[in-house]
Image (cartoon, grey):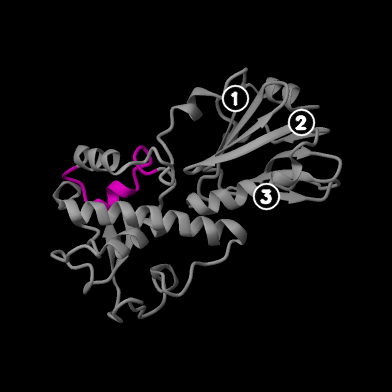
Amino acid sequence: MPELAEVEYFRRRWDAGLGCPILGVAMQADKRVFRGNNLETLRRILSGATLVSSQARGKQILFRFSKRGWLGVHLGMTGELRQELPDFAPGKHDHLVLFQRGRALVFRDPRQFGRLLFHHGDMEPEWWSSQPPAVTSDAFTFERMRAFLQRHARAPIKAVLLLQQGFPGIGNWMADEILWRAKIHPRRRAGRLAEKEAKSLWRSIRFVCQGALKTVAKDYSEPPPSWLFRHRWEKGGRCPRDGAVLGRGTVGGRTTVWCPVCQSQRSRPAR
């Protein structure tokens, strides 16, 4: 499932259409990705509207159009945004296509776990403005993170990192990367972290998210070999820090990778 950096990468794919009007709209209106929308209004407003701006927050994207139109995109597991030639013919899984003079902006989702949300109004929709602050923003403070951990004190820290109400955009591989850098075992209880461990966790969240935005979001490149990401799925993969064979298991319902040496249950946080 796309995470913070992958979502940002897909958002940028539609940026070529900024400032350009929509000449036509093609929809597969019977698909579940449109559930809850007034499709007649969506087509009427977007037809002739200009794409004004876009932004990503967590695992969601918001596109603003003229004519007071807002389009929210949640990619889900297999959703993607791409740009095609203006004479593009939509295929079976191309559920929304916005045609412009120089291109076609396409939303594709083979398994339909994603979702499109349309809003018509002067202000951005409530389902967007009510989201928690981005983990890379100034509003994501250590105190805010610490309070969220305490609200889920009995849960494994890996499972808590996947909760989008507190850590929007963080998914499976990023959570493993964060905990590996903070030297915290993924099964540690969120409420049992010492002050130094929690501060190490907060710094690691910022580092991994900002680093991923610089690499993955740019051109879908992988992070450097010094990251756990490059070794987590290797057969017999080893920790890039100490060379130990990586441990694997299920935590919070998700496949999880960690280093049994530097992330032992009693390990101390990195300096």
Q: Is residue 7 left or right of residue 183?
A: right
Residue 51 lies within the magenta run: no
Asked whether the beta carbons under mark 1 and mark 3 sit within 8 Å of each other, the answer is no
Q: Residue furthest top?
A: 122
Tell me the tag on residue 37: 1
Main SS, magenta region, reads loop
Say which amino acid is labelled 2.
Thr
Q: Secondary structure at mark 2?
A: loop
Residue located at (25% from left, 59% from top): 186
Q: Residues within 10 Å of mark 2 (few under 14, many from 20)?
A: many
Residue 130 place in picture, x, y as percent:
44, 27
Categorize mark 1 by other alpha carbons within 10 Å: few (<14), some (14-19), many (20+). Answer: some
Quickly name the residue at label 2.
Answer: 50
User: Could you say whether the residue bearing mark 1 is in a helix, strand or loop?
Assistant: loop
Residue at image point 26% right, 57% down: 200
> Residue 266: x, y in percent?
13, 65
Q: Mark 1 or 2, which is nearer the eye? A: 2
Q: Is residue 17 above or below residue 65?
A: below
